[in-house]
Amino acid sequence: MKHFFLAFLFPALLTAQTMELTRDLGNTVLCGDIALSPDGASVAWVQSFAAFKTKQITIRETYGDAVAAVTVKLGKGQEWTDSDPAWSPDSKTLALFSTPGEKEQKQLWTVTAAGFHDQKLTDLKGYAARPRWSHDGKQIAFLYIEGAGGGGPLVAAPTTTGVVDTAIHNQRIAILDVATHALRQVSPPDLHIYDFDWSPDDQMFVATAAPGPGDNNWWIAQIHTIDIAKGNATSIYKPSLQLAVPRWSPDGKTIAFIEGLMSDEGAHGGDLFTVSANGHDLVNRTKGRKSSVSSLFWHVQDSILFTEYVGGGSAISELTLADNSTRTIWKGAEGIHAFGNFPNLAVWKDGPYAAVVRSNFETPPEIWFGKIGEWQKLTNNNVSQSPAWGKAENLEWTNDGFNIQGWLLPPAKVESGKKYPMVVLIHGGPSSITTPEWPAGFGMSRAIIAALSSRGYYVLLPNPRGSYGQGEDFTRANVKDFGGGDLRDTLAGVDAAIAKYPIDPARLGVTGWSYGGFMTMWTVTQTNRFRGAVAGAGIANWQSYYGQNLIDQWMIPFFGASVYDDPGVYEKSSPIHFIKKVKTPTLIIVGEHDAECPAPQSYEFWHALRTLGVPTQLIVYPGEGHMFVKPENQAGRLDQTVAWFDKYLQ
């Protein structure tokens, strides 16, 4: 059956317009993993091009007349891939991880603030990430899986043959002595650590942790304190939902964290909580707030700065613990958060200043620094970039008593008296959100927005129930109802867009990746309004999916029970059970080694459509996981998607 999985090898369909757009977007300079020195004088970040893997640390002073940024060249100038910059407490040294090649071992390095005098500190054998200095500057802690790989379920899963390995390789906290380079692992070997923070006296850690396997059990993690000297861990809080970003207060008495219904590690959203260091005095600080907290920083002793998703944008707010009052410092139509997946914000510890990577649908990413909300631009890496697509507009509508928000990009040129096709792009998650961002990033998944708009499509990006941005009740509103209310919300958004803009209701398309891929499969089984569909990394059968994926723990909070205890709730949302209703031509795309949404789910949906005579095609990209990393495959996925909609909608 192998030949079915190689369907992508038919002749290339790239048009000159798509090739030019892909090339231009691929040349976007990206800035990630931003780190601001404690004295506020320097900012470091990982710089790369959107279509290339090489990533290098760049350092620049923050004041207005600063010299040009310095790109750090480690290992005698080789172009290594860098990540995770972290400043020492005295702001003189930057620690980072670096690797000379895709399959080479990552090691911990230090470099001076001027970008010189680099030094390799470790001889690691295994996965490592997230270095954090102790407050006295004498130690660096980081996450380490000795003798094994890591990186989470987004990356390609290894091929499994023979006797399936059930060994658990837990991610632990390792501490490096900066002076002697001595390394020791200090967290218990039976716990997988997801995130951590030093206590103010450097004697303990607070961490989110669970017994392994780590990729699966993040959804049941608890908050632990870890005694460094003794190496033991004490659970101080067992949540009802998911946890993220545990951070210790400056006086060591309180721990702040985020709890909420989250579907992916690193895609944070929920309420802001505090709890005493001994596990008492739990307080939900943002209960009922119509937003989703995404990251947090202890600002001064009695206040916390936090980022939050509000509607379809972001805000930075301050919480005063004494009276539990909040004030919004900045709010905008952008996506801004720290920590987790693709962070773009770093806050100065001594005042309301921050370094941030800012962009929106029309403005390419650049680094800004200054007082929060009064930032000044530090870089001009993308001055040659200009949008070849339409200007995004905020679109709001109501459905089932909910206020729903989305973004609508028109075609690059809209002629009077003419109607245009529209593609609905449904985000993954479901606990996630579409915020305005330049349509080029790592993985190039957002390039489809620009490609469709530039080729004469309206593109609707809805944030239906289940999304972040309107509080926990809204995020939880699709629990046990996947594809029910959220599809009704999306279809109501289609109606709202058609009523306001020159959109041809007979030329509608739908697409999405991950949960968006499921929603695409689900949509074509529930309505024949769409003339073309592209389902990326979708889920056709929740019952069989439960036993195929490597992260089944995520399903319990959303379905209420395992598939073995309540198979009915899984069956009612499975597209395969309504497959005979499908009339929409559907392209199906997936990575060969996807651990989150395994390829057999795509194969099952494709096989059914093919058997029933519905126009369909399956493309399985070799070696890829849930997130595509090979530039040629990123471009191929974009090309095939555009070509499919051109065929059935234009």
Image (cartoon, rainbow, N blue to C red):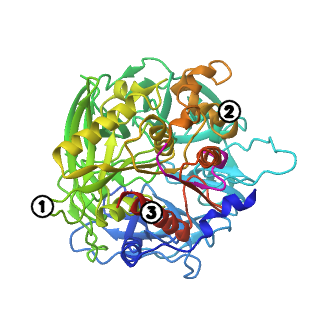
Q: Is residue 376 above or below residue 338?
A: below
Distance, label 1 to label 3, CA atoms, is 32 Å
Distance, label 2 to label 1, CA atoms, is 61 Å
Name the residue that disc number 3 marks: 444
Label 3 residue SS: loop
Going 59% across and 26% down the picture, which residue do you hit?
A: 571
- Quadrant of residue 574 in the image? top right
Q: Residue 250 in the image: x percent, y percent?
A: 39, 37
Q: Is residue 402 above or below residue 514?
A: above
Q: Give the number of the mark in front: 2 or 1.
A: 1
Rendered image: mark on residue 211: 2
Tell me which numbered mark, 2 or 3, is placed earlier along the sequence.
2
- Quadrant of residue 416 in the image? bottom left
Distance, label 2 to label 3, CA atoms, is 34 Å
Label 1 residue SS: loop
Rendered image: mark on residue 331: none
Instruction: Determine whether label 1 and label 3 are within 8 Å by CB.
Output: no
Q: Which residues are magenta?
A: 583-600
Q: Residue 325 in the image: x percent, y percent?
A: 22, 26
Going 45% across and 37% down the picture, which residue do you hit?
A: 430
Q: Residue furthest right?
A: 163
Q: Give the number of the mark in front: 1 or 3.
A: 1
